[in-house]
Image (cartoon, rainbow, N blue to C red):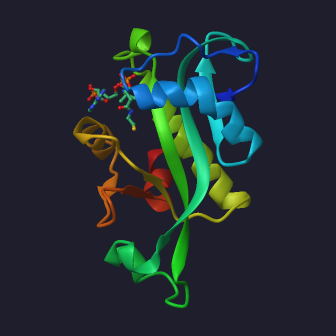
Amino acid sequence: MVYLTVPLAPTHDKAAFSCGQDMLDRYLHKQAGQDMKRRLSVVFVLSEETKSGRVKGYYTLSNDNIPYDQVPLNIQKKMPSSYSSLPTTLLGRLAVDRNFQGQGLGEQLLLDALKRSYDISTSEIGSIAVVVDPLDKTAVAFYAQYGFIQLPDRGRMFLPMKTIKQLF
Ligand SMILES: CC(C)(COP(=O)(O)OP(=O)(O)OC[C@H]1O[C@@H](n2cnc3c(N)ncnc32)[C@H](O)[C@@H]1OP(=O)(O)O)[C@@H](O)C(=O)NCCC(=O)NCCS
């Protein structure tokens, strides 16, 4: 499978990355490498050259789960009630450098993350949906365009693997 992104490596130039959200910039500059070493998340980057060069955008993926009773009812009904929580994939962060925003890269990164998550869920690690924690209202609007629905829990948003399958 060909993806646009590769896991962050020490050869990537991340110092100049700036997306307009300090938290997401600081994460890439200071924490991303450590998180990967600790297996907390995998940071996937899109850069000028595959294994080096300036980072244009990034996203993170981790295993996660949501309590059974927070899953939308139509999906809950299809799941065995013996599960107290259901496995999901967390798209923890997604950002595009300011110099490259508005050119479709955000959409390409999101689709790359969804495809990767879907592929893994079919053959490697079970997951019923991709979940995001939008930082603000504009991020909610961004994810809503792609069919993410809001969960009753802390504003999280949820896109079932079944819907993701139909995107490709
Ligand atoms: C949100 C973000 C990732 C979008 O990246 P981008 O490369 O500018 O987006 P694209 O050019 O691919 O645009 C994709 C679609 O999203 C829309 N969009 C772009 N930025 C948006 C935003 N901030 N809010 C809502 N919609 C947005 C575009 O209008 C476009 O829709 P269209 O095709 O109907 O015109 C980028 O602005 C960013 O990094 N922002 C700061 C970090 C952030 O808020 N991340 C959100 C996740 S926490």
Image position of 99 with respect to 24: above or below:
above
Tell which of 8 and 6 is nearer to you.
Answer: 8
Percent coordinates x, y for residue 20 in the rendering = 36, 21
The answer to whether residue 21 shows anywhere in this view is yes
Question: What is the quadrant of residue 78 in the picture?
Answer: bottom left
User: Is residue 153 shown above or below 22?
Assistant: below
Q: Quadrant of ligand 1?
A: top left
Q: Is residue 92 left or right of residue 107?
A: right
Q: Could you say which quadrant of the image residue 139 lies in?
A: top left
Q: Position of residue 123 (x, y in %)?
A: 72, 59
Q: Residue at x 43, y 12 (%)?
A: 100
In front: 95, or 118? Answer: 95
How far across and down, in percent of the image, does residue 120 sit?
67, 53
Quadrant that contains the N terminus = top right
Q: How many marks?
A: 0
Residue 160 on image: x %, y %: 44, 60
Q: Residue at x 46, y 75 (%)?
A: 67
Does the image show residue 108?
no
Could you tell whether 22 is left or right of 81 in the image?
A: left
* Viewer-nearest residue: 85 or 50: 85
Q: Residue at x 49, y 81 (%)?
A: 79
